[in-house]
Image (tube, rainbow, N blue to C red):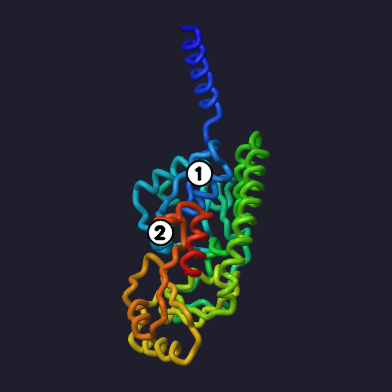
Amino acid sequence: MRLSKDIVIGSIVFLFCVSLFPAIKVVATYPYIADLVEKVGMEKVSVKSLSRGSWDPHTIVPKPSLIAKIRTADLLVINGAQLELGWLPALLNQANNSGVMPGKKGFLDLSNYVKLIQTPTNVSRAGGDIHPAGNPHFCLNPDFIPELARAIADKLGQLDPANNSFYRENSRSLDKAWKTQLAGWEARIAVLRGKKVIEYHRNMDYFLERFGMEVCETVEPLPGIPPTSRHISHLIEKVKHGDIILILHDVYHSKKTSAFLSQKTGIPMIVLPHDVGAVEEATDIFSLHEEIISRLCK
């Protein structure tokens, strides 16, 4: 009886302490961000994602349930580079949470911590759906992941100074584990260095550039513009007279054209995940990159 009473008292004290130090409520725009926040913040954060990995990251539907998540958040972490431009501003306006607005303490834009590629010199509708800030799919460059984790750790430390060292140590642990994995990935994918590929949409460019692969063409004639029969004919001729080895496709666009191109040319089409949860195997940021490597190296 005495032991049971001590256990009950101990549980009450624990719950009381937890209530005194509630978890930081974090909202992330994409699953990979939510995963990084959870790895850095662990039990000291409560994380919700505004999207799923299988969705098109450019066109998230601004549902009322997403507004509710932002309204109660202590911190909003976004990808940035205008990837959320088409859907997040409307949610922020309706959520009426001044603490997580751009420029406030409870706001973090991860694109500020990486070097963006493909920044256009001229922006117009004639070029398709161009991102004025540059290609926003930077989470697929594995070199950037430790930097993003450090940025998250710094922000959590600002909001919760008492646990600043905790967040920093978790970030360092992630960095160490990540570098170990990266060494193995580099060894496996080395055989593809210098190889040429076709993409449907330019969401793998950071990854391909990092590992020395070249994008020759895209199935989209311009970003966000569906392929035409004329463009498909051009691609078929390009493949016939080149040394392209793969057609890379994402999970959210129709595969019909890429599959047709593969059939006509004999070049394999591979579906690659772009975010955590985009495919069943990509359960976190580590397995996301592992799955990309595995699918490319089959």
Position in image of residue 55 (x %, y %): 38, 60
Q: Nearer the viewer, residue 200 or 180?
A: 180
Position in image of residue 137 (x %, y %): 52, 65
The structure residue drawn at horizontal position 45% and vertical position 89%, both measured from the top left corner, is 238
Q: CA distance from mark 1 to mark 2?
A: 24 Å
As helix, strand or loop, the secondary structure at mark 2 comes to: loop
Kindly identify which numbered label has been placed on residue 53: none
Quadrant housing residue 142: bottom right
Q: Check disc 2 and report the residue beneath it.
A: 279
Q: Is residue 33 visible?
A: yes
The structure residue drawn at horizontal position 51% and vertical position 82%, both measured from the top left corner, is 216
| Nearer to us: label 1 or label 2 | 2
Q: Check disc 1 and report the residue beneath it.
A: 26
177 sits left or right of 275 in the view = right
Residue furthest top as drawn: 1
**At label 1, which amino acid type do we have?**
Val
Q: Is residue 125 visible?
A: no
**At label 2, which amino acid type do we have?**
Val
Q: Residues within 10 Å of mark 1 (few under 14, many from 20)?
A: many
**Mark 1 or mark 2, earlier in chain:** 1
Numbered marks: total:
2
